Image (tube, grey):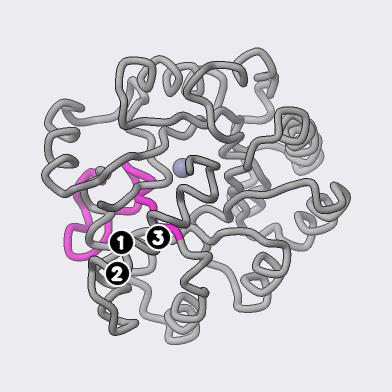
Amino acid sequence: MIVDTHCHIHQSDYPVSVDAVISRMKQADVGWYVGVGTDRQSSTEAIDFCRRRNDCYSAVGVHPHETRNGYQIDDLVDANSVIAIGEIGLDYFYEHSPRDVQQKALIAQLKLAVKHDLPVIFHVRDAFDDFWPIFDSFDGRLRGVLHSFTDTIENLQRGLERGLYIGVNGISTFVKDPAAQSMYDQIPLDRLVFETDAPFLTPAPLRGKVNEPANVRLVAEYHAARRSLSFDDIAKLTSDNAANLFGLN
Ligand SMILES: [Zn+2]
């Protein structure tokens, strides 16, 4: 069994048939997956999607890109399937929302995570210098995962020191930069979780197709080979990590 800790197949604009995607996911032995919100609508869609299924958990949050349109999700957190706040964070690469708005939205949603004692799915891109002071201002009350982590070994270390899990997806299967490859190899096995971010970031050798949770196997196979582990061993380790991350033990 393997877990996809981050996907968006619940969204109404997911471009392929969800029934087919779910059946391929079963064949690939993906035991469960997290449907992650990026705004109020997709968070609501995640809750509704998971309500009808027993292999799905939802996360509610407003992605930094969307924060300029508001970030009030307090009333969504109590739904049964909600196991995390996210994806939330800072994105200065695209900067679709002004930086000060992104920061205010992040702080407001982190307060919500603390209030409800939930882990956080973090999206941070080109913004760690502003991110760490905000994270640290919560004095150790936050836990969660750095989703789609592609940053430096230094920021990996800062995340590990703070007890965070590290989410690795298809990007890791096609990066050519040796420094980036070695960063992925240095993520401790007890902090590593896999994800697809479907429909985005399709792993090699399927690049160009719409991504789906079944493809989390390709990410796991790639890292099993690099670490000289069996697929079953890395699948078990990372599934246990995912359960710990989201408090599903
Ligand atoms: Zn995502």
Rendered location of residue 60, percent (x, y): 56, 28
Q: In this view, does 72 lie to the left or right of 234?
A: right
Occupied quadrant, residue 62? top right
Occupied quadrant, residue 136? bottom right
Q: What residue type is labelled 1?
A: Ala
Rendered location of residue 137, percent (x, y): 88, 50
> 10 Å neighbourhood of mark 2: few (<14), some, or many (≥20)?
few
- Which residue has dot 3 on it? 238
Q: Which amino acid does label 2 sit on?
A: Asp
Q: Give the residue displayed 57% in from the left and 35% down from the top.
A: 84
Q: Which amino acid does label 3 sit on?
A: Thr
Rendered location of residue 1, percent (x, y): 25, 52
Identify the magenta region.
193-211
Rendered location of residue 106, percent (x, y): 74, 38
Q: Which mark is drawn over residue 233?
A: 2
Magenta stretch secondary structure, dominant: loop
Whole-number angstrom distance, CA of label 1 to CA of label 2:
5 Å
